[in-house]
Image: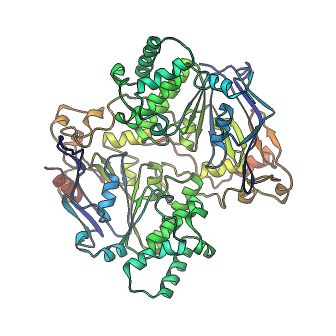
């Protein structure tokens, strides 16, 4: 069964640093990513800054054009949709509600915007839909004519959520939706997102660097390192039984307010590599404590381990034999052959 | 290094008030802050935006806005009264005896000076020694914070370094004059988690080596519980609870602390997908004087009397301090309800 959103062998490249004398270099933001999201599912994408997670989100929204590969929404490439039709089906929520809302528009106008873009609706109908949506996200009606500057961070993020769901889309791309908020407000927004998903049968792509938040909200997790998926699978496996050394490192670096949790031993090593000149073989090998000679030369294929799919040479020969039965591992493998 | 609580505190603040005049009236940002800090100790000041956690540290360094008015019953650093100290006198202390690490190294470093110049500047400004000595110390500290090829790095500009490296440079600058106190305001919030863990371990290690006191300002309970000796929880310009880090975080007394700890999602296996605990309502206005407890409108334990009288400051047998109308016994009983999820052992931690 194919998912509502399919990413197939996606590559997104940018030219950077070109000038009269210097040739532009190519930045491989997404370097062969394949994944499939089922209707009603929450798939989280985690990774460090610069790993390509936001580029992936922007490509799914049709803001960036793939260099290679494609994104299918309900079986159709997103490039084939008219802009208004795409906007009616897939919508974003961004990190910072202070910069994602136009300060000169009222709450009503901000939320109504996607409906105006789609067109073909009477004013009264639009207003009714805006009021209904405000109620859904817990914004009092009296705020309809307020401006964002008069609102708290949590209220602004509710406006951004209302704007995203007003067309009743199928898929919402949430790009770090709570990282600019205080923890007590974060809890309110996460609860709201979970309620809305159930009520409106939404599918979320949830981009985050916070594993505790990801653990709370998602069904499956994909871990990205330098434009490639290194591990993907159910939350229980990826976060609580991580296989890939990078996922394990992320897990160990997450500081939990539990008794006896102490800081991990500091390991000084190279920082995040240059995405215009990624390391050969496995991109993670310069930072990896388990690196073997083969890791420097060959990019690992995707292997099925338990319920997860892992791209790491450590599991070669140890992986389950049924890897061919898993469409996702085949996809990842295909995506990583240049 | 063991902390000697019998010695006089390095920093002693009592009844610190700060207000900023605005067109709508005085904004009372700090409403009586008290804390003490000992040599070699790490105190975490925790709160949400607008709680006054950053301003309270800026005030003790004299870095608050000039139009703000500050008063305190007591404000001493290393035995010296620092309240009402002139700006030149404060400048002698800052960067020398007390240093600050800010959240975003991209804005706290000067983009048009090499990191070498920025390291040496602090040392020379305080007349600590010659330029050559300053350069030697800069190289030593850069190596100490884990920067390889330190000598070559001195000639580089901040934009040539990654975020984690920049924050290490900021830490090295803070250490140049061997301060007695470092104030770190959300030092890892702008960094990735793997880098955050490195920077925090580094700070802890350096603190033990140089015997500094550290004030860590943070909103992240996970960060705080991994590094702090003591914790002070701020809400609306006052410290509502303070005490040993483990006690305050794992057995909170004040209802606000309880809410703050409970609303953080946890990385535990076997989650039940229950809604997260939330603190209803919003932060109160800080304009003008107030009566009663400022948390009462959001508090599940509020009584009518909470609006009438300011909550008393209470001290427990183990030295914890909290501001609430309820007694320790009442709060303790209220919080140990059977519905609490049993803490799960940290299984799966690699």
Q: Residue at x 36, y 76 (%)?
A: A88
Residue A193 shows in the view: yes
Q: Quadrant of residue A95?
A: bottom left
x and y percentages locating residue A333 in the rendered image = 18, 52
x and y percentages locating residue B277 in the rendered image = 60, 57
The answer to which of B125 and B319 lies nearer the viewer is B125
> What colouring method underlies this structural image?
rainbow
Q: Residue at x 74, y 20 (%)?
A: B79
Q: Quadrant of residue B197?
A: top left
The answer to which of A91 and A124 lies nearer the viewer is A124
x and y percentages locating residue B17 in the rendered image = 76, 41
Q: Residue at x 48, y 67 (%)?
A: A161
- Position of A24 relative to A325 (above/below): above
x and y percentages locating residue A216 in the rendered image = 47, 56
- Position of B217 relative to A237 (above/below): above
Q: Is residue B164 left or right of residue B331?
A: left
Image quadrant where one finds the N terminus of chain A: bottom left
Q: Is residue A191 left or right of residue A72?
A: right
Q: Is residue A261 left or right of residue B244?
A: left
The answer to which of B39 and B274 lies nearer the viewer is B39
Q: Residue furthest front?
A: A20
């Amino acid at each position: 069964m194919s998912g509502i959103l399919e990413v197939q062998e996606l590559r997104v490249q940018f030219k950077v640093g070109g000038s009269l004398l210097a040739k532009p270099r190519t930045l491989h933001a997404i370097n062969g990513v394949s994944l499939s999201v089922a209707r009603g599912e929450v798939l989280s994408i985690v990774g460090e800054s610069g790993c390509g997670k936001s580029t992936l989100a922007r490509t799914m929204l049709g803001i960036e054009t793939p260099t290679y590969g494609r994104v299918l929404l309900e079986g159709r490439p997103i490039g084939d949709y008219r802009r208004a039709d795409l906007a009616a089906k897939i919508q974003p929520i961004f990190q910072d509600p202070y910069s994602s809302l136009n300060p000169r528009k009222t709450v009503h106008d901000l939320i109504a915007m996607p409906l105006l873009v789609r067109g073909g609706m009477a004013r009264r109908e639009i207003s009714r839909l805006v009021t209904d949506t405000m109620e859904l996200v817990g914004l009092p009606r009296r705020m309809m004519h307020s401006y964002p500057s008069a609102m708290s961070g949590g209220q602004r993020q509710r406006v951004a959520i209302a704007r995203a769901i007003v067309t009743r889309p199928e898929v919402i791309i949430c790009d770090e939706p709570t990282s600019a908020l205080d923890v007590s407000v974060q809890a309110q927004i996460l609860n709201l997102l979970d309620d809305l998903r159930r009520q409106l049968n939404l599918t979320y792509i949830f981009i985050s660097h916070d594993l505790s938040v990801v653990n709370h909200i998602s069904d499956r997790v994909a871990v990205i390192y330098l434009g490639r998926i290194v591990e993907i699978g159910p939350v229980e496996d990826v976060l609580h039984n991580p296989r890939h050394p990078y996922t394990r490192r992320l897990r160990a670096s997450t500081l939990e307010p539990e008794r006896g949790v102490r800081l991990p031993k500091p390991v000084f090593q190279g920082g995040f590599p240059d995405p215009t000149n990624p390391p050969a073989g496995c991109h993670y090998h310069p930072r990896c404590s388990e690196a073997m000679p083969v890791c420097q030369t060959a990019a690992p294929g995707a292997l099925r381990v338990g319920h997860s799919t892992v791209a790491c040479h450590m599991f070669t020969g140890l992986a389950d034999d049924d890897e061919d039965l898993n469409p996702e591992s085949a996809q990842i493998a295909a995506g990583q052959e240049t | 290094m063991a902390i000697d609580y019998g010695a006089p505190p390095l920093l002693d603040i009592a009844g610190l008030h700060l207000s900023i005049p605005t067109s709508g009236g005085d904004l009372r940002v700090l409403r009586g802050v008290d804390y003490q800090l000992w040599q070699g100790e790490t105190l975490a000041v925790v709160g949400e935006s607008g709680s006054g956690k950053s301003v309270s540290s800026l005030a003790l360094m004299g870095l608050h806005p000039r139009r703000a008015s500050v008063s305190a019953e007591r404000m001493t650093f290393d035995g010296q009264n620092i309240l009402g100290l002139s700006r030149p006198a404060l400048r002698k202390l800052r960067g020398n005896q007390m240093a600050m690490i800010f959240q975003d190294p991209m804005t706290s470093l000067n983009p048009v000076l090499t990191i070498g110049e920025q390291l040496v500047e602090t040392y020379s400004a305080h007349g600590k020694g010659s330029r050559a000595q300053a350069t030697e110390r800069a190289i030593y500290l850069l190596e100490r914070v884990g920067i390889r090829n330190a000598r070559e790095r001195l000639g580089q500009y901040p934009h040539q370094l990654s975020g984690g490296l920049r924050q290490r440079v900021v830490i090295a600058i803070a250490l140049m004059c061997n301060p007695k106190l470092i104030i770190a305001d959300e030092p890892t919030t702008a960094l990735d988690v793997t880098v955050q863990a490195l920077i925090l371990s580094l700070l802890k290690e350096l603190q033990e080596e140089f015997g500094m006191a550290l004030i860590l300002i943070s909103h992240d309970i996970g960060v705080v519980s991994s590094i702090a000796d003591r914790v002070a929880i701020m809400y609306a310009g006052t410290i509502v609870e303070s005490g040993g880090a483990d006690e305050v975080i794992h057995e909170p007394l004040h209802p606000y602390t309880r809410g703050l700890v409970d609303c953080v999602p946890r990385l535990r296996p076997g989650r039940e997908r229950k809604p997260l605990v939330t603190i209803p309502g919003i932060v109160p206005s800080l304009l003008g004087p107030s009566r009663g407890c400022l948390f009462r409108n959001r508090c599940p334990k509020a009584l009518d009397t909470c609006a009438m009288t300011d909550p008393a400051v209470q001290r427990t047998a183990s030295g914890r301090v909290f501001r609430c109308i309820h007694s320790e016994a009442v709060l303790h009983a209220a919080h140990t309800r059977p519905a609490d999820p049993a803490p799960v052992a940290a299984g799966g931690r690699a």
